[in-house]
Image (cartoon, rainbow, N blue to C red):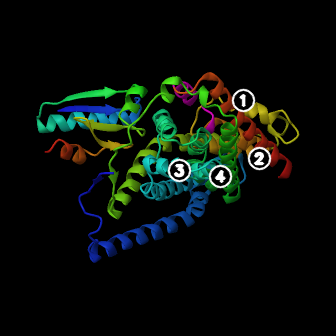
Amino acid sequence: MEIKVLGPGCAKCSETEKIMTEAIAETGITATIEKISDFQQIAKYGVFSTPAVVIDGQIKCVGKVPTKKEALAWLDW
Amino acid sequence: MPTITSDHPPDQPLATATKIKYILMILTGLALWLAIYKNLHNFAEYSAFSLLGLEPGSRLGEAVLFFIYDTPKVLMLLVLIVFAVGVLRSFFTPERTRLILAGKSESTGNVLAALLGIVTPFCSCSAVPLFIGFVTAGVPLGVTFSFLIAAPMVNEIALVLLFGLLGWKVAAIYMGTGLVIAIIAGWVIGRLHMERHIEDWVREMHIKASDVPDEKLTWAERFGHGRTAVRDIVGRVWIYVVLGIAVGAGIHGYVPEGFMVSIMGKDAWWSVPAAVLVGIPMYSNAAGIVPIIDALLGKGAALGTVLAFMMSVIALSLPEMVILRKVLKPQLIAVFIGVVAVGIMLVGYLFNIII
């Protein structure tokens, strides 16, 4: 699984990354997590409110910090 | 647009019992809130003069009274309003706002954008992605600026503090003039046709239609948004409120009456532009600055000058300019700062003349 956290690097973006990392650890699945902070790259995803989470190319949420429950659901857990 | 269904499908009505439970909880909460709020002044006087034994009318007594009355008052207002705004904002997303604005002409678009700037949830670090999203979707440049100016300037924290410390009239003046500045400044920027001063890579960008999931929320989830907003925002700003009120209380009790008249009074014409200039590099949130402004007003500073200072601090911040530089060329940033600064100065002079 390829997880990308999109955000320029404010507190909410770091929080989102932390929640995704924790969710991955809880499920024990193998997944890569990548932080994307370059505006040009973020725009290419068609996302314009950050933080956003993209899993395997699919946009899962934008403009908010997801809850752990949501994160686990996206990982099919 | 694909739809994410939440845990409870929205078309399934909440069980009547749950609904009644919610309504009762809200009513009880509001009644309790109101009962405490109404008695804050008595409690503060009792604490300051009976419990602590301070002399009414003495410097220390007045400063302490100011602090123990205004701190809980402002914090309680903050919790209530931030919760309400959190619920309100769950009806808006930047995606929906963009859809509304994309089809609009200028003028109407400027007015709508400024109003939507107040209710659309938007974190200031999203300014650049949002700018790209708006402009590439065909939202006119000037309309985009109306949004970007209104969003930080007219915010619930500023309004709560102005209302709590200075009364509803000042809060209404601030909100009204803030909106007018956002609408007119955006319109002026649009008239100047500065599209070529957007960075080239943004203009060349072709973004696929957004396939961002559109969420349907239940009321329980909307209240959840309100709770999260209270935890996030009040958790972040309470310390500034308390510090701001403490400094304000000090000024209140110890700085002589009329001290600010010569520096920030009506007759010092240069004080309005000076207040705006000083405000640009200052970066503070409304929470810390309003209590100080309140105290300055009490010492003879003119309302227009003080409002101009506050607007400049909140709406024109250096860090935001640095971020926006990634998508705007320097000329456009300069015009943005110039137009907004002139608008703020006009507001400052206007209120110094009429009040």
Q: Which residues are magenta?
A: B315-326
Q: Which label lies toward us, 4 or 3?
A: 3
Q: Nearer the viewer, residue B199 or A74?
A: B199
Q: Which residue is mark 1?
A: B277
| Callout 2 and callout 3 share a chain | yes
Q: Are marks 4 and 3 in contact (CB under 8 Å)?
A: no
The first of marks 2 and 1 along the sequence is 1
Query: Which amino acid, mark 4?
Result: Met
Distance, label 2 to label 4, CA atoms, is 14 Å
Q: Does the magenta run of residues contain B80?
A: no
Distance, label 1 to label 4, CA atoms, is 21 Å
Query: Label 1: few (<14), some or many (≥20) within 10 Å?
Result: some
The first of marks 2 and 3 along the sequence is 3
**Residue B267 seen in render:** yes
Q: Which residue is mark 4?
A: B175
Position of B302 compared to B70: left or right? right
Query: Which amino acid, mark 3?
Result: Gly
Q: Are marks 3 and 1 in contact (CB under 8 Å)?
A: no
| Residue depicted at 78% across the width and 42% down the height | B346
